Amino acid sequence: MKDFVQVAQKVVEAVTNIVPFPISLSDEHGYIIGATNKKRIGTLHTPSREVLAKNTFLLFDEEKVKDLPNVMPGVAAPLILDDQTVGVIGIIGPPKEVEPYAQLVIKYVETIWQETIQQQKKELETKTLETFAQYLLLNDEPMKSKIQEYCRILNIPYARKRFCIMIDIGNSLIDKMQRNLPIDQLKERLLNCTRKAFQSSQADICTFLNTEKIVMLKAIHTETDYFTILQKFDDQSSHLRSMFVVYHINDISIGVGHLSKQLEFIHHSYLDAKKVRDLGKRLNIKPPIYSYHDWNMLKQFLPDQINPNFLDKVQTRIKPLLNDDHRSELIGSFLIYCENNMNTTQAAKALFIHRNTLIYRLRKIESTVGIDTGSFEQCMILYLVLKGMGIERGS
């Protein structure tokens, strides 16, 4: 059995640590594939063939093995895994001393083998899932047939609407690699935290995309489900951030993308999540939890979305204001005025100035650039342009 051959020596080394006798493992043809004495690996062990033929436990004393090459006294027994005889285990030593250990060793080998195979399967599934995510999200034109094949292998439902949640942890994993920490174990714990925070189902895809990013491709049935989940997004993201802090991972930012009706187009949702996260970090929005579905966040994003050509034209139009000696106080007052719903009393209070002083500054802006500060539409244009230019509030 191929899997057994791959893990035989690991099993031998594990068993050698708990029994006082050397051991060997032979395959279904009688060749040694694992041994305490590694020089014996690859050699033929004739008693193993006898054990396989009789499919029973046998003793080999010194008299019986004296004329047999590569054979030492001890006991040999068939090794049965998943109801199949896959080889022979030999325990070397005086048969009467070795025999009491035989059943214990056989059971232990079976247990170690099963655990090792399961671990290998889990590692293979983890790597396959990461590869699948990379194919889906980093490929502009993934093939439907290939996606469906991955879904079949990984037992993932194909025909579901999904959206992408992206968690960026920066260099946290690399830093911990340098400290010789068990990275695979840490990664699994972080994935478990992510599944728990976002209430993952079996239909969701949750994996590391690379050392910096975790992605969850969350499966839903309807658009209503999507908006219901987004209402919880901030709270769930905050909960995830608090769980990651337990593992000393503090540099965390989270973005969520739009809904995709098919897996072939889920990379658009990933790009949305990445874009909103990059924009939020550039604007230094705190906490670093970003969504286009948050109106307060959209308000902060919008100035950055102004077309550069339009921005340049309006900037030329308001050049007299930008060159004014009192530019800082004029622009700052105007921004606060807009952010207080164009209410001069509230804005003056926020600025710690007299209402008449604010009115004077607004009139100065009107005369300088020709804007009507009583018009919501005109104020909105100037406000967005000033914010888009990166001009902050003054006093």
Image: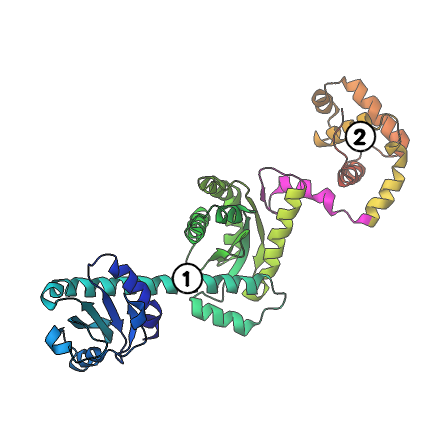
Q: Is residue 328 left or right of residue 184?
A: right
Q: Is-magenta flag for residue 289? A: yes
From where the camera sits, is residue 38 visible? Answer: yes
Q: Nearer the viewer, mark 1 or mark 2?
A: 1
Is 178 situated above or below 123?
above
At which x and y percent is residue 394? 76, 27
CA separation in Å, label 1 and label 2: 58 Å
Q: Secondary structure at mark 2?
A: helix
Residue 322 vs residue 233, the one in the foreground: 322
Residue at image point 35% right, 74% down: 2
- Residue, disc 1: 123
Q: Which residues are magenta?
A: 283-308
Query: Few, some or many C-alpha atoms within 10 Å of disc 2 (few <14, some 14-19, many ≥20)?
Result: many
Q: Quadrant of the N terminus?
A: bottom left
Q: Quadrant of the C terminus?
A: top right
At which x and y percent is residue 170? 57, 47
At which x and y percent is residue 189? 42, 49
Query: Few, some or many C-alpha atoms within 10 Å of disc 1 (few <14, some 14-19, many ≥20)?
Result: few
From where the camera sits, is residue 262 visible? Answer: no
- Residue, disc 2: 331
Residue 334 vs residue 149, the one in the foreground: 149
Sequence-wise, the earlier of marks 1 and 2 is 1
Q: Is residue 248 left or right of residue 325?
A: left
Q: Residue flagged by tag 1: what amino acid is it?
A: Glu
- Residue farthest top in this picture: 354
